[in-house]
Amino acid sequence: MSQEVVSQLAPTGVLRAGINLSNFLLVTGRSTAGDPEGVSPDMAGEIAMRLGVPIKYVPYKSPGELADAADTGAWDIGLIGAEPQRAAKIAFTAAYCEIEATYLVPEGSHLKAIADVDQPGVRIAVTGRSAYGLWLDRNIQKATLVRSDTLDSAYDQFVREKLDALAGLRPRLLSDVKKLPGARILDGQFTAVQQAIGTARQNAAGAAFLRSFVEEAKASGLVARLIARHKVVGLSVAGPG
């Protein structure tokens, strides 16, 4: 292992991994010590093992908070959805896994397909600064985005204000739809959230190592094994970068 890579990714002698706790597919529990468990923490742990350093998890309540800390030195690698807005400060790998994002609509909705949603007068509930929310920020032209801070508050606002659609990751929407008689999830996806690993842009050698690691982790079956180990439904291994 190149000493330059180790010094860039673990300058304190410990790999500090920023973890987004709100992604329930990638963080599925807590250890007895209180550390996050799941596909994302396991990927970070594997990187630490390759570097020959201990792992320290730096948890964040939302992906936006994790991204905001990119230039503060609070974390060395961040496991987060790769989005162009975030890439200004973060050097991302290719995705190691993907999650479908689509819409839930209420009973009796006139919205039948994803293409119907971006129309004048349509109000979409969305978790602000989520990866799929950032995609909607860039791509929605006619509908109105109604942003909330969390997944739960987006759902609550959707119900309370009788909004036209709730944007979200399909696995979460599968649980939300059970709470709303007559509601349905639209077929297909408006995007697939690309879950990647990033580091500060100045860490060129570290970023190159992370890119190689992710491609190896996909090709070797490591990512698939982690998904199976944690029994995650709705998460798929991304294609080659």
Image (cartoon, rainbow, N blue to C red):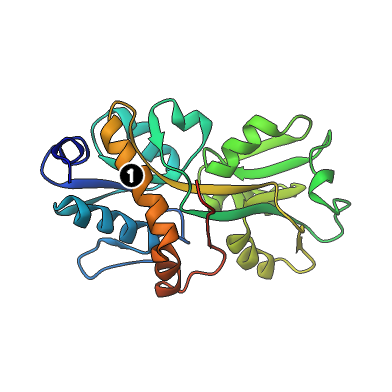
Residue found 74% across the figure and 47% down from its top: 163
Q: Amino acid at mark 1?
A: Leu
What is the x, y in percent for residue 112? 86, 54
Q: Residue furthest left?
A: 13
What is the x, y in percent for residue 131? 53, 42
Label 1 sits on a secondary structure element that is: helix
User: Please, is residue 146 above or below residue 44 in the view?
Assistant: above
Residue found 44% across the figure and 58% down from its top: 218
**Relative side of 139 to 4, left or right:** right
Residue found 34% across the figure and 28% down from its top: 201
Report the residue marked by disc 1: 210
Viewer-side residue, 191 vs 130: 191
**Relative side of 205 to 52, left or right:** right
Q: How many marks?
A: 1
Viewer-side residue, 71 vs 98: 98
User: Please, is residue 167 above or below residue 82 in the view?
Assistant: below
Q: Quadrant of residue 46?
A: bottom left
**Relative side of 59 to 166, left or right:** left
User: Please, is residue 88 above or below residue 211 in the view?
Assistant: above
Residue found 71% across the figure and 43% down from its top: 124
Q: Quadrant of residue 93?
A: top left
On the question of residue 156 being in view, the answer is no
On the question of residue 177 being in view, the answer is yes
Q: How many neighbours does mark 1 have within 10 angstroms: few (below 14), some (14-19), or many (20 or more)?
A: many
Q: Quadrant of residue 43?
A: bottom left
Viewer-side residue, 62 vs 56: 56
